[in-house]
Image (tube, helix red, strand yellow):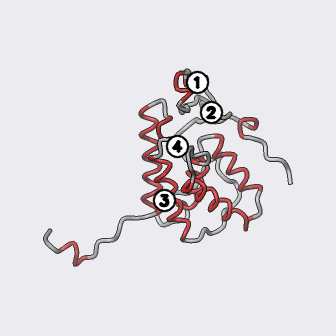
Amino acid sequence: MSEIQPLNQRFRGPGAALRRVSAPAARMPPTAHEENDMGTWGTGPFDNDAAADFAGALDAAEPERRVVMVRDVLVRTIEAKGGLEDADEAVAGAALVAAQCPGGEPVDTDYGPQQPMPAFPDDLRKLADEALARTATDPCGPAPNWVDAEDAEQWQAVLARLRAVLVPPPAISASDAERPA
């Protein structure tokens, strides 16, 4: 098996401007900061080095191992104590799970996996939703680290869309809709 090269050594994303910083680096100009050698170039699930590297690792893994890798990153994020070290990978994994759900959008980016993903078991939907909820709100996660408020709103909207697909609202029956409130 060939060694997986970190994304920042393979190519840079469009614009290459970093939009997220860690709390200690918040005093630095956003374009001068790299968080653990991680660049962020957009608000999509695979628009950062960590998620793109995760996609590369998925591509390099045997197909039967890919489900385990996605499950593991979701569980690590849900159960994390302190910082959310795997949050970007968990968002990427959740996007892959959501892509297989009714109403899910396909992962169609050069930074996502290029190999087909196996069918993910239904129980991953709940884990993906929990990992996204934790990532979206945890003060030790990426949510408070966005420099630009508009980027932060777009990123939160991406997470909300993924969550809506993973756990759709309960259907309202015709009899419920006719009842007065």
Of the image marks 3 and 2, the number of the one nearer the N terminus: 2
The residue where tag 2 is placed is: 35
Q: Which residue is mark 1?
A: 31
Q: Is residue 152 left or right of residue 81?
A: left
Residue under pointer 3: 129
Q: Are marks 1 and 2 in contact (CB under 8 Å)?
A: no
Please say if the residues under marks 1 and 3 sit with CB atoms less than 8 Å apart: no
Circle 1 SS class: helix
Mark 1 is on which residue type?
Thr
Using the image as rendered, state which of residue 65 and residue 103 is in the foreground.
Answer: 65
What separation in Å lies between label 3 and label 2 (alpha carbons)?
Answer: 25 Å
Q: Real-space Cα distance between discs 1 and 3?
A: 31 Å
Quadrant including the N terminus: bottom right
Secondary structure at badge 3 equals helix
Name the residue at 13% across, 71% down: 180
Amino acid, disc 3: Asp
Indicate the amino acid at tag 2. Answer: Glu
Of residues 129 and 1, the one nearer the viewer is 129
